[in-house]
Image (tube, helix red, strand yellow):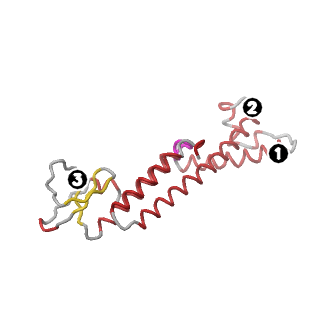
Amino acid sequence: MTAEEITNLEISLPPDMGLLVGRRGNKFEERVDITHPDLPFIPLPVAGPDLKIARLVASESIDSAAEEVSAHFATPGSAKAMRYQEKAREAREIVAKLDAGEVVDPTLYPACNTEWPARAASFEDFARLVVERASEWALISGHIEKAQAEGKTAVEQAKTTDEVDAARENAVATLTVLLHPSEI
């Protein structure tokens, strides 16, 4: 079940359910009264599925934040990622040959050759720029993966919806800091 499906979930509960947990935005709240006037509150029974749902929503929120941060540094999409990888592989090879004093034939490197005129003054400049950006991405993506994994682990280890909420907030805050790599 996705967060959107959970958000749109309508649950009718018997009046004797007692304590309820519900989601308001990304925050889980406990409430005894389900007739509260400011509802867009999704009531969920406390019995166990609520913690699973809280974990699911929090994990999805962390994944979303990680994607948002990633998109700040690299265009999303698997095809684009494959093109970036090929371009980076070519660029590393080009730079290694140039640094060794070899002459490089741009036509042997189609991923770099087709783009460089739009991005740099020379084929060499473009290859060096791609290598620099690929190195930056390797650094930042490692931090993104770490924050995402730590956040999701904390969510899974949480014993209450409040702990889930705190773990999610911490992970999203950590990921947000990554938008400013100079602060890492």
The residue that disc 1 covers is 97
Which of marks 1 and 3 precedes in the sequence? 3
Considering only vertical position in the picture, is 183 above or below 159? above
Q: Secondary structure at mark 3?
A: loop
Amino acid under disc 3: Phe
Nearer to the camera, 117 or 70: 70
Considering only vertical position in the picture, is 37 above or below 54? above
- The reply, left or right, for residue 125 in relation to residue 68 is right
Q: Quadrant of residue 136?
A: top right
Q: Give percent across and percent down for residue 36.
A: 15, 52
Magenta-drawn stretch contains 74: yes
Q: Give percent across and percent down for residue 38.
A: 18, 47
Which of marks 2 and 3 precedes in the sequence? 3
Amino acid under disc 1: Lys
Crowdedness near tag 1: few (<14), some (14–19) or many (≥20) residues, C-alpha within 10 Å: few
Q: Quadrant of residue 109?
A: top right
- The reply, left or right, for residue 182 in relation to residue 27 is right
Crowdedness near tag 3: few (<14), some (14–19) or many (≥20) residues, C-alpha within 10 Å: some
Q: Secondary structure at mark 1?
A: helix
Amino acid under disc 2: Ser
The residue that disc 2 covers is 122
Q: Residue at x 12, y 65 (%)?
A: 15
Residue 41 marker: 3
Q: Residue at x 82, y 45 (%)?
A: 97
Nearer to the camera, 43 or 111: 43
Where are the magenta residues, as a range?
70-76
Q: Residue at x 83, y 43 (%)?
A: 99
Q: Give percent across and percent down for residue 35.
A: 13, 54
Q: What is the count of numbered marks?
A: 3
Q: Quadrant of the N terminus?
A: bottom left
Circle 2/circle 1 CB separation < 8 Å: no
Which of marks 1 and 2 precedes in the sequence? 1
